[in-house]
Image (spheres, grey):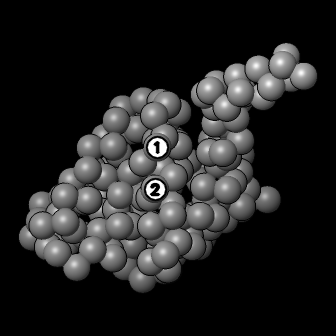
């Protein structure tokens, strides 16, 4: 009985293993949570809390941590808090891009954030480079490493509004993603 109690208590003390972190920070789940967070403040707060606890250095997961900071700026009412979240996100995105500069998902996350930042803040300096990396990643799919659903989401997003020039849209439309 004492041995069983010891092992149960030991289990409470042991930190989450990297394998558990991989499960908790599953990319498919993060993608869904980020989408919900971009549309709902309560979801954004949950997502931000979860991602603030992420301390490992996987580049795509790190980019989602940056995205969680950026999405909190959307819901902050104080201009100082908004700017603080955006600047924190920018720093995290720089780190993630530095770790894997050709990853189209990382570049897409940063692009979506920078696209919606007011230009007068001068925090949108990576739009063209990110757009080029995104288009190149779409061209290389599936060898770019992106899941097909993510590639389709990116393709669809890049074809909306003023995200791309007409010439870039034509290139993106010509890319077949299966």
Residue where numbered disc 2 is placed: 49
Report crowding for label 2: few under 14, some 14 to 19, many 20 or more residues within 10 A (C-alpha). some
The total of numbered circles placed on residues is 2
Give the image location of residue 171, x and y in percent: 53, 64
Q: Check whether the beta carbons of the residues at disc 1 and disc 2 lie within 8 A of each other.
A: yes
Q: Is residue 97 visible?
A: yes
Q: Residue furthest left?
A: 120
Report crowding for label 1: few under 14, some 14 to 19, many 20 or more residues within 10 A (C-alpha): few
- In the depicted structure, whether residue 15 falls above or below residue 26: above
Q: Which picture quadrant has residue 98?
A: top left
Query: In this view, which residue lies farthest toward the bottom?
Result: 161
Q: Is residue 13 above or below residue 73?
A: above
Judged left or right of residue 140, residue 57 is: left
Q: In front here: 16 or 64?
A: 16
Q: Nearer the viewer, residue 165 or 89?
A: 89
Most distant residue in the front direction:
2
Q: Secondary structure at mark 1?
A: loop
Q: Quadrant of the C terminus?
A: bottom right
Position of residue 131 relative to residue 6, above or below, is below
Q: Quadrant of the N terminus?
A: top right
Please give the name of the residue rendered at 33% of the width and 43% of the height, measured from the top-left corner.
92
Residue 107 at x, y percent in the picture = 43, 50
**Residue occupying image coordinates x 21% and y 53%:** 87
**Label 1, label 2: how many angstroms apart (C-alpha)?**
7 Å
Residue for point 66% across, 45% down: 24
In the current view of this chain or complex, which residue is farthest to the right? 1
Q: Tell me where residue 118 sits by quadrant.
A: bottom left
Where is mark 1, residue-wise? 53
Residue 89 horizontal side relative to residue 64, left or right: left
């Amino acid at each position: 009985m004492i041995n069983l109690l010891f092992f149960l208590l030991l289990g409470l003390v042991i930190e989450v293993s990297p394998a558990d972190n991989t499960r908790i920070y599953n990319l498919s789940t993060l993608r869904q949570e980020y989408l919900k967070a971009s549309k709902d403040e309560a979801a954004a707060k949950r997502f931000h809390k979860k991602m603030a606890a992420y301390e490992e250095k996987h580049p795509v997961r790190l980019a989602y941590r940056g995205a969680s900071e950026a999405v909190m700026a959307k819901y902050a009412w104080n201009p100082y808090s908004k700017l603080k979240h955006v600047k924190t996100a920018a720093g995290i995105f720089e780190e993630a891009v530095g770790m894997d500069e050709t990853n189209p998902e990382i570049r897409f996350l940063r692009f979506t954030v920078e696209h919606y930042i007011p230009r007068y803040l001068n925090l949108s300096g990576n739009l063209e480079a990110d757009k080029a990396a995104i288009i190149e990643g779409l061209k290389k799919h599936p060898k770019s490493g992106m899941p097909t659903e993510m590639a389709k989401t990116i393709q669809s997003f890049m074809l909306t509004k003023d995200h791309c020039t007409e010439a870039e849209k034509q290139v993106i439309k010509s890319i077949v993603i299966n």
